[in-house]
Amino acid sequence: MNSMRRSIGRVIRAVGIRRRHSHGHAFIDEAETLALSDGWKDPRLPNRQRRVYDRALDNMRSGNSPRSFQVAAASTRLSGISEPSILEIGSGSGYYSEVFSHMVSAQVSYVGLDYSLAMVSLAKEKYGPSSRFCVGDATRLPFRSGSFDVAFSGGVLLHVRDFRRAIAETRRVARYWAVFHVIPCVVSSNTSFVKKTAYGVEVIEVIFNQGELCSAFEECGLRVRERYVLEAYPVGLIQENAYLLTFACEVVPLAPSATVYRPAKGP
């Protein structure tokens, strides 16, 4: 824990505390989490978000990749698989498909899944009708177990009410490796549900206690092999900073007492 605080301190000094494009955090109850659970399906979001990531992709191509892109690539390469098959869960308009092909391998076999039809439609518009994007739910993935070398949960776990089931499903479809990218965590406070405004739309966010989250990974058969700190920021509701973390996990055998969710049917 102390090493975590030291590494976070270095990132605060190096990166600064910043959270663009989202604000207005407030605690919510169970009923509100249900009411806001479809917030990211709002048809206004894809183009607003895409404009931001188009600039980030331009920076990547010019040799100035954002830290989030660098960490996504590093955490995926850590699997040791030179040309992995990757499922991105929460793929949005598909911008990380370019990150993987540019920074991991041009031979990556990529599939993107998002629960927003508007996001998937924009992804297909950007990358062509033959691109591999589909609509699906992070808690009921429409793929057979072990279908992908790497399951990459791309900044989506924090928006899923049943996040434990989403973790279990991520592990189920991953053959070797799972990455949970851009996850807001706190060191001392309990896991909590909040609402915020993202790109002008109200959505839910889970702020995880990092110890509780790592325990959930372990219970689902995922062992954290590396943890990356992207940045730190004040939430205002909590008497400590939150930290955006990325967890790179190895798929390991499930403990005999582990909860096993019924897998979704798939091809």
Image (cartoon, helix red, strand yellow):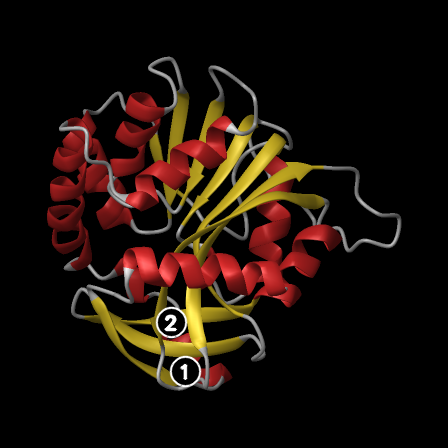
Tell me residue 177's x, y (percent): 59, 33
Dot 2 or dot 1: first in sequence order is: 1
Residue drawn at x 19%, y 64% is 21
Closer to the camera, 128 or 207? 207
Q: Is residue 67 above or below residue 107?
A: below
Q: Nearer the viewer, residue 61 or 137?
A: 61
What is the C-alpha distance between the residues marked 2 and 1?
9 Å
Q: Secondary structure at mark 2?
A: strand
Give the residue at the far right of this rendering. 256
Please indicate, yes or no, whether residue 54 appears anywhere in the rendered image: yes
Q: Does residue 115 sit above or below 81 in this rendering?
A: below
Q: Residues within 10 Å of mark 1 (few under 14, many from 20)?
A: some
x then y, percent, for residue 233? 34, 70
Q: Are marks 2 and 1 in contact (CB under 8 Å)?
A: yes
Front residue of 14/192: it is 14
Which amino acid, by three-letter code, is at mark 2?
Ile
Left or right relative to 212: residue 241:
left
Dot 1 falls on a residue whose secondary structure is helix
Q: Residue at x 16, y 69 (%)?
A: 200
Residue topped by disc 1: 32
Residue 166 picture location, percent across and down:
56, 53
In the image, which is nearer the foreground, mark 2 or mark 1? 2
Q: Residue 10: x, y in percent?
A: 41, 58
Q: Amino acid at mark 1?
A: Glu
Residue 231 visible, this angle: no
Q: Which mark is residue 108?
A: none
Q: Quadrant of the C terminus?
A: top right
Q: Name the side, left or right, on which 29 lies relative to 67.
A: right
Mark 2 lies on residue: 204
Eyeballing the image, is 142 above or below 118? above
